[in-house]
Image (tube, helix red, strand yellow):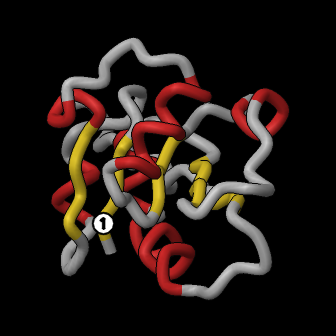
């Protein structure tokens, strides 16, 4: 699958999407494009999906006439994304009724620090 990663996502997300051709907004030279213009560019370039953490995009943009899918992550925090990588990969593989899917991500459990040395 040909994927675009929005500018608010960690660049390292590309490494978690093995088997997909993932590009970033920066790679494409599209930094700073508004959501509507960006989605138009995504479709013109032939991307299958765009991954973003922009929670408001569904209220700003109609996806009804779009060919590209929009996958919205509930967080852009790297540790949370890394912990939920399998959920992201599964969301990309599942057929969708529409072109918009939210992927809820849970933060990893907190690491316990060892007690201070005495």
Placement of 74 over or under 10, stated as above or below: below
Which residue occupies the extreme top position in the image? 32
Mark 1 neighbour class, 10 Å CA radius: few under 14, some 14 to 19, many 20 or more: some
State the image coordinates of residue 30 (x, y, percent, origin top left): 30, 24
Residue 34 or 116: which is nearer the viewer?
34
Q: How many marks?
A: 1
Q: Would you say residue 60 is visible in this rendering?
A: yes
State the image coordinates of residue 61 (x, y, percent, origin top left): 75, 35
Q: Residue at x 51, y 38 (%)?
A: 40
Placement of 49 over or under 89, stated as above or below: above
State the image coordinates of residue 25 (x, y, percent, origin top left): 29, 33
The C terminus lies in which quarter of the figure? top left
Which residue occupies the extreme front position in the image? 44
Q: Residue at x 47, y 60 (%)?
A: 49
Q: Quadrant of residue 33?
A: top left
State the image coordinates of residue 26 (x, y, percent, origin top left): 21, 28
Q: Would you say residue 104 is visible in this rendering?
A: no
Q: Residue at x 70, y 33 (%)?
A: 57
- Left or right, residue 22 beside residue 32: left
Residue 98 or 118: which is nearer the viewer?
98
Q: Residue at x 65, y 56 (%)?
A: 66
Q: Quadrant of residue 104?
A: bottom right
Q: Quadrant of residue 65?
A: bottom right
- Left or right, residue 60 beside residue 32: right
Which residue matches tag 1?
2
Q: Secondary structure at mark 1?
A: strand
């Amino acid at each position: 699958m040909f994927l675009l990663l929005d500018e608010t996502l960690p660049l390292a997300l590309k490494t978690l999407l093995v088997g997909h051709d993932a590009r970033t907004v920066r790679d494409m030279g599209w930094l700073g494009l508004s959501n509507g213009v960006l989605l138009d560019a995504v479709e013109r370039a032939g991307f299958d999906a765009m991954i973003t953490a922009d929670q408001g995009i569904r209220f700003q943009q109609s996806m009804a006439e779009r060919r590209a899918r929009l996958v919205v992550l509930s967080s852009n925090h790297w540790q949370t994304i890394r912990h939920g990588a399998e959920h992201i990969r599964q969301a990309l593989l599942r057929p969708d009724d529409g072109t918009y899917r939210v992927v809820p991500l849970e933060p990893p459990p907190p690491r316990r620090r060892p007690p201070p040395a005495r």
